[in-house]
Amino acid sequence: MTDADNLVEIKSMTFFREKRAIFSDLSLRIPKGKITAIMGPSGTGKTTLLRLIGGQLKPDQGDVAVDGLSVPRLSRKQLFELRQRMGMLFQSGALFSELNVFENVAFPLRVHTKLPEDMIRDLVLIKLESVGLRGARDLMPSELSGGMGRRVALARAIALDPELMMYDEPFVGQDPITLGVLVKLIRQLNDALNMTTVLVSHDIDECLSIADHVCVLSGGKVLVQGTPEQILQSDEAEVKQFIQGLPDGPVPFRYPANDFAEDILFAGKDGVAG
Amino acid sequence: MLDWLQQIGDRVLSIVAGLGRSAQLLFAALMGLGYVLKNFRLLVKQVYVTGVLSIAIIGVSGLFIGMVLGLQGYSILVDFGAEDALGQMVALTLLRELSPVVAALLFAGRAGSALTAEIGLMKATEQLASMEMIGVDPVKRVIAPRLYAGIIALPLLCILFSLIGVWGGMLVGVEWLGVFDGSYWGNMQASVSFTHDVMNGVIKSIAFAFVVTWIAVFQGYDLEPTSEGISRATTKTVVHGSLAVLGLDFVLTALMFGDF
């Protein structure tokens, strides 16, 4: 695979939060035009990874390149320009609560283009139609269900036809119908708008059903990557535990503690257990 | 002992770091003036939210404080047969001290806490982050209009407070207690100096507006994005804002009226 085939390249990146290393020497490629799913247990820094790609956080070492541009080295102005080519769907949807659905989707168009009002209207309605919510244009975000809010946020994220679309846990807390709708939308949008998609999630079935390329992260490193079939057939114990949802394995069920019997028997005798 | 010292050091460091972050935010927001002028509607909306919506509380408080001043002033002055000076006393007390200070305290409680909660909620629900990802700087779009709106709104509210207060003093002094209205207004006109009293009061309230709004937007922008974080930050806005107003008032009063 040559460099030109990758839209995002993360090269031996290290990132610390306070004193804890979230990523150490992480290298990752996101191929152009495909859906890449980044999976891993909670707390592996999946959302952090998206923020590093979007330049909201800076790595402590290494580099994050988007379309050949080194994100941490861009000036603030260049970074904001680059972000116009990215769309991100936040976990909470993050719709602007003081604007209605129409104005939320129109927001990126209004701030970044000088299009006439009737053209903005058409574009917004096209985007809303593509997520099936053209009829909800006059509602306020507080009047939407969780799933609808996420679809409006999706329409807003694709308003400027981004080259790179990032989804932060799009499937969390959705009912089965919304889930199906979202899975279908993500695939359709990627193919129809010729985007590159990065999907961060721990919903295995949904991810494996739409992704072209899967990366499983754990402990700040890439555990395994490949096609969904390769992931399913992986022999790695930690991958197996994650894919099959086993409660105990290389990722322990218990938070580290001292000996259980000792904790019970000696509690209260010497004041401090253990 | 060493632990204790370390804790003090930790605390001081975090305070200094907070001051640094707030100065950074202030600078960035003030630099957003161009953006605010270009998107003038954002400013107008915020002046409405922070200013117009505070008119009720400012008006009612101004009226009552003016009435109380009229009553208390009369009961003191009448002993010396000096009740004709009531207008002068009410006007000077309001213009120099009570209007700027009380309006700023009410503003911190009404508009400041609302600003903090609103910005904090936008942070907690990732609205600020998503704005950044859309390629719009939230400091320019969200913080700057609110900061400038506060600086515009509070001095106007302070003037309104004085006007209603003077009228309230008149209601009690003239209409109820029978002070001659010619001397109420005449003594006021003769003794109130525009530069020394009116302008100094307005300058005070501009300074308070600046500090209170700065504290409010910083607390909102800097808070920990959880529900506890938001409630802590709103409290801090009111407490820090009020203390800053009272402390600053002493300094400004000493500078403005301290030369005997």
Image (cartoon, coloured by chain):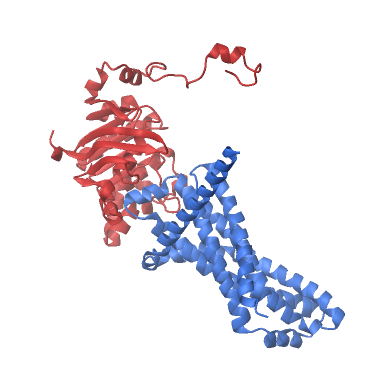
Q: Residue at x 20, y 35 (%)?
A: A34
Name the quadrant of the C terminus of chain A: top right
Q: Colour of chain B?
A: blue
- Residue B119: % across, % down: 48, 52
Q: Residue at x 59, y 83 (%)?
A: B195
Which residue in the rendered view is the most extreme toward the right?
B79
Relative height, residue A117 to residue A29 (above, below): below
Q: Residue at x 55, y 41 (%)?
A: B6
Q: Horizontal placement of A259 versus B138: left or right? A: right
Q: Horizontal placement of B4 versus A180: left or right? A: right
Is there any visible trace of residue B152 in the rendered image? yes
- Residue A217: % across, % down: 31, 28
| Residue B260, picture quadrant | bottom right
Q: Nearer the viewer, residue A129 or B132?
A: B132
| Residue B99, picture quadrant | bottom right
- Residue B87: % across, % down: 73, 81
Relative height, residue A131 to residue A37 (above, below): below
Q: Colour of chain A?
A: red
Relative height, residue B195 to residue A63 (above, below): below
